[in-house]
Amino acid sequence: MRPLIRTARCWLLRARVRAMATLPMASPAAAIPSSATRPVASPSSRSHRPLTRFFSVAPAPVGAKGLRAAASAVEVGGVKIAREDVVKEDDPTNNVPDTIFAKIGLQLHRRENHPLGILKNTIYDYFDKNFTGQFDKFDDLCPLVSVKQNFDDVLVPSDHVSRSYNDTYYVDDQTVLRCHTSAHQAELLRDGRTHFLVTGDVYRRDSIDSTHYPVFHQMEGFRVFSPDEWSGSGLDGTAYAAAELKKTLEGLARHLFGAVEMRWVDTYFPFTNPSFELEIYFQDDWLEVLGCGVTEQEILKRNGRRDHVAWAFGLGLERLAMVLFDIPDIRLFWSNDKRFTSQFSEGKLGVKFKPFSKFPPCYKDMSFWINGAFTENNLCEVVRGIAGDLVEEVKLIDNFTNKKGMTSHCYRIAYRSMERSLTDEEINNLQLNVREAVKDKLKVELR
Ligand code: PHE
């Protein structure tokens, strides 16, 4: 399985060093019940400026096909977002398609009976139990953020690949759809927060397969320590925070997975140092479950916490939920089909999903001569724009350059509905439309 934190073709320059020990796990844990209701953000005893712009009203309804009517608007975190605020076809600095606008405000992680909501609440339970009343919770922060929040505030270098139009959805050259929940670290620190969990939808341009979707959900955790907390420990601040971080996350992994084997892997993030990934051994394979590390001093210094240390982690909820609930395809999280939604209920983590029926995939190949501007992410965006969630995978199966220096790519597109059989006619039509759109939008020469 590809890592949660996108690499190579996408992002996060990782220098992985498989150096850390494998940790044998202790006690087994069963499915964990979660408490009934939770406030969006736990009231804090400290006095904070209210984050009014962060709290929202109900998500906007969507049409039968999942695409919102063009004129409608949605309100998230107190911010009203209309289509024209996000999709600007004539603006070359904008690359947000309607399929993405349609997802804003759905907030799957706030549905108590949805696998993502159940998982979020189970993680909340762990923090409530082990750090009673300490962590402030946010799950309704607006996903439209500035380039500064998403990148500069967390020290992402100006030439980092994640800033490219190929990887990130830009509303304009100053505004993006957040590509990680780390985008909220700096503002929450400035607001005086020292312990917080931020859950939200995040957006990344990417290729298509059963574990990747351009919108997914992350939870960020952040904890600040003051010097008096580590002074008696015999460790320096960084070592203390790293030890606390590992202890906290190993406990979380046990809370979610029971007695699993885990290991720490050194890695690189621009905002933490040292940085780690936690992997668990699951179904005969090492699975990356989260990225984390000790927060760069510069971030603390800039945001009112000089002389403190902190840890941070970011985990992908779909990645964990697919494993915990046996959900085979990431598109299912977006399904409104009762045969999917009725299988999950509040507090029941780890109920295994029973596929309601299996429909066969249908494969269509298309070959074309690419041009210098071609990218696979752009291709996938076009294919999704036509076929929506009926496209299961887009895979490069042939690639060659001829004597004249022209490069040909052949992609195999797998079409499959999660909910019904597709007719030949429907698929042939889709493929025809995909071919036309690819030719028009990407200016490639079909073969
Ligand atoms: N923001 C990182 C990502 O999305 C995850 C992360 C969060 C890593 C916090 C370290 C600390 O890939």
Image (cartoon, rainbow, N blue to C red):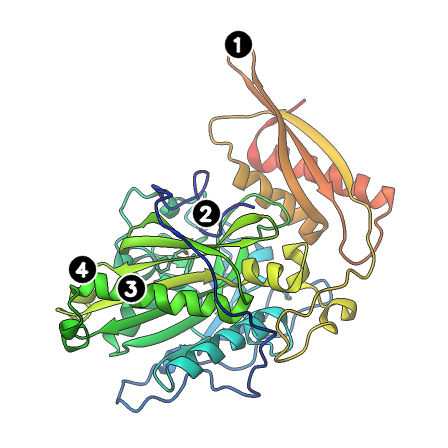
> Is tag 3's residue or tag 4's residue first in the polypeptide sequence?
3
Q: Are marks 3 and 4 in contact (CB under 8 Å)?
A: no
- Helix, strand or loop at label 4? It is helix
Picture quadrant of residue 329: bottom right
Q: Which mark is residue 243?
A: 3
**What residue appears at the point 37 percent right and 89 percent down from the top-left corner?**
43
Q: Earlier in the sequence, mark 4 or mark 1?
A: 4
Q: Which residue is mark 4?
A: 298
Say whether residue 345 is left or right of residue 263: right
Distance between the alpha carbons at the discs numbered 3 and 1: 58 Å
Q: What's under tag 3, amino acid-wise? A: Ala
**Which class describes the residues within 10 Å of circle 3: few (<14), some (14-19), or many (20+)?**
some
Numbered disc in front, either 3 or 4: 3
- The residue shown at (20%, 61%) is 238
Q: CA distance from mark 2 to mark 4?
A: 24 Å
Residue type for callout 4: Glu
Instruction: Identify the element where label 3 is drawn.
Output: helix
The residue at 32%/44% (across/down) is 160
Mark 3 or mark 2, earlier in chain: 2
Query: Looking at the image, which residue sits at the far top?
Result: 403
- The relative height of residue 306 versus residue 360 in the rendered view (above or below) is below
- Mark 4 to mark 1 CA distance (whole Å): 51 Å
- Label for residue 404? 1
Q: Position of residue 237 (x, y in %)?
A: 18, 65
Q: CA distance from mark 3 to mark 2?
A: 26 Å
Secondary-structure class at tag 2: loop
Q: Which mark is residue 6?
A: 2
In primary-sequence order, the first of circles 2 and 4 is 2
The three-letter code of the residue at mark 1 reads Lys
Residue nearest the viewer, comparing 304 with 224 = 224
The mark nearer the N terminus, 2 or 1, is: 2
